[in-house]
Amino acid sequence: MRMEKMEIPKVEVTAEYTPSNPNVVLKARSIVREASELPEFGGVGSDFTPLEYMLASLASCEAFMFGMFAKMLSKKMPNVEISVEGEFGIGEGVKSLRIKYHITGIEEETALAIINQVKTTCPIYNTLVKACKKISEEVIVKPN
């Protein structure tokens, strides 16, 4: 299956740090969130760190795309949970990623076909693949 060429709209996010707030305030569209840093790095640890947001971006993008492709390729709508673990180095960026796909409700062959589509089209996955030489993936499928 081939997806027609889709344009992703331009994305803009602002981050503001002020002395009155130990977190950074993030704004995208009309949505406001905060990013925190771990206490050992001078933060309060009250929200996702920037690195956790990056991994959450990968997991959520793949989950959304999994659902989209599942609707196209499967008669059943499965459940999918994607967990991502990353190792980072200061001045190095991402050193390794471990991605686990837990899928319930479809056959393994269909699940693997969907994951293949997700990996070839997810912009966040494709960006990180270029930056990280060590990516391991595990797929756990429970048909029901």
Image (cartoon, rainbow, N blue to C red):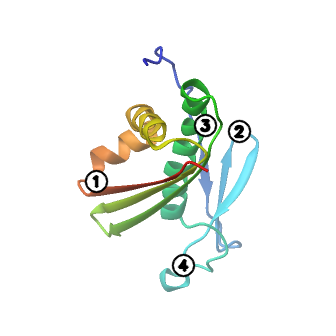
Helix, strand or loop for disc 2 = loop
Q: Badge 1 is on which residue?
A: 132
Helix, strand or loop for disc 3 = helix
Q: In the image, what residue occupies the spot 62% across and 42% down?
A: 78
Find the distance from the CA under tag 1 to the CA under tag 2: 30 Å
Inspect the image, locate mark 2, and give the three-letter code of the amino acid beneath it: Arg
Which percent across, then down, holds residue 127? 37, 42
Q: Badge 3 is on which residue?
A: 67
Mark identifier at residue 29: 2
Inspect the image, locate mark 1, and give the three-letter code of the amino acid beneath it: Cys
Which percent across, then down, holds residue 59? 52, 51
Q: Earlier in the sequence, mark 1 or mark 2?
A: 2
Inspect the image, locate mark 4, and give the three-letter code of the amino acid beneath it: Leu
Find the distance from the CA under tag 4 to the CA under tag 1: 23 Å
Q: Badge 4 is on which residue?
A: 38
Which percent across, then down, holds residue 96? 31, 62
102 or 94, which lies in front?
102
User: Crowding at label 3, few (<14), some or many (≥20) Cα neighbours within 10 Å?
Assistant: some
Find the distance from the CA under tag 3 to the CA under tag 2: 24 Å
User: Crowding at label 2, few (<14), some or many (≥20) Cα neighbours within 10 Å?
Assistant: few
78 horizontally vs 96: left or right: right
94 or 67, which lies in front?
67
Nearest to the eye among marks 3 and 2: give it.
3
Nearest to the eye among marks 4 and 3: give it.
3
Find the distance from the CA under tag 4 to the CA under tag 2: 27 Å
Which percent across, then down, holds residue 50? 52, 62
Q: Examine the rendered structure and indicate whether residue 14 appears above or below residue 72.
A: below
Find the distance from the CA under tag 3 to the CA under tag 1: 25 Å
Inspect the image, locate mark 3, and give the three-letter code of the amino acid beneath it: Gly
Nearest to the eye among marks 4 and 1: give it.
1
